[in-house]
Image: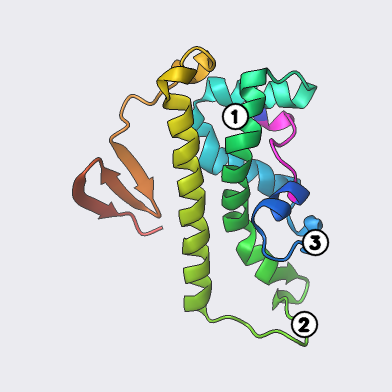
Amino acid sequence: MANLKKYKALTTSTDVISRCFTNENTDPYLISDNSLILSELAHIKDVLGVKFYGELKLQNDVGTLTVANTTFLNDYLKDTLAWFIRFEVINEIQMNSSSSGIITNMDEFSDIVSPNELDVYKQDTYRKAEIFLKDAIDFLNDTDQSGDYPTYENNKPCNTDVYKNHGILFSGNNVQSYNLNY
């Protein structure tokens, strides 16, 4: 499973908009295929493990998802991905780069949000994505599911105590953290 980027994304821009955008008239072209893949690679691949992620990508690409993988993808992973994708594209939706530089997308009936308001919005979006991700992983770790997802079982991280959240490393219940300034 060397090149998982060659397979189509696990969700679509229209599905993302319908799952987590307030305005369902949001232009789906604002969410590129690269944004979909970027969100998978940044937020999903390592959590699921390369084998299970690769299995989902391959089966989704050729239309051979197992019943268990269909359930997981449709009932858990697509909601998770939708919120992570929204998190990743918020800046691009608010601002675009052009030959004139960075421009703010604004119509005559809107106002630009302050950097603080944008940060609160992004953090809330990320929090929601993390809630959906935890629910998805809880589903996979449920003892009743143990035989349905063998490639996930084989890829559980060795050190589940350590995780990164917005550049800060956390270790289980330990309150000690390290700000990595990125």
> Which residue is drawn at the image coordinates 50% and 12% (left, top)?
147
Mark number for residue 107? Answer: 2
Q: Nearer the viewer, residue 132 or 47?
A: 132
Q: Is residue 39 left or right of residue 105?
A: left
Q: Earlier in the sequence, mark 3 or mark 1?
A: 3
Pick the quarter of the image with the C terminus. bottom left
Q: Earlier in the sequence, mark 3 or mark 2?
A: 3
Characterize the local packing of mark 2: few (<14), some (14-19) or many (20 or more) Cα atoms within 10 angstroms.
Answer: few
Characterize the local packing of mark 3: few (<14), some (14-19) or many (20 or more) Cα atoms within 10 angstroms.
Answer: few
Q: Earlier in the sequence, mark 2 or mark 1?
A: 1
**Residue 39 appears anywhere in the view:** no
Q: Which residue is mark 3?
A: 27
| Type of amino acid under label 3 | Asp
Q: Please identify the quarter of the rendering in which residue 174 is found.
A: top left
Distance (Cα) linking label 3 and label 1? 27 Å
Please name the predominant secondary structure of the magenta segment in the image: loop
| Type of amino acid under label 1 | Phe
Q: Position of residue 63 (x, y in %)?
A: 78, 22
The magenta span reads 5-13
Mark number for residue 72? Answer: 1
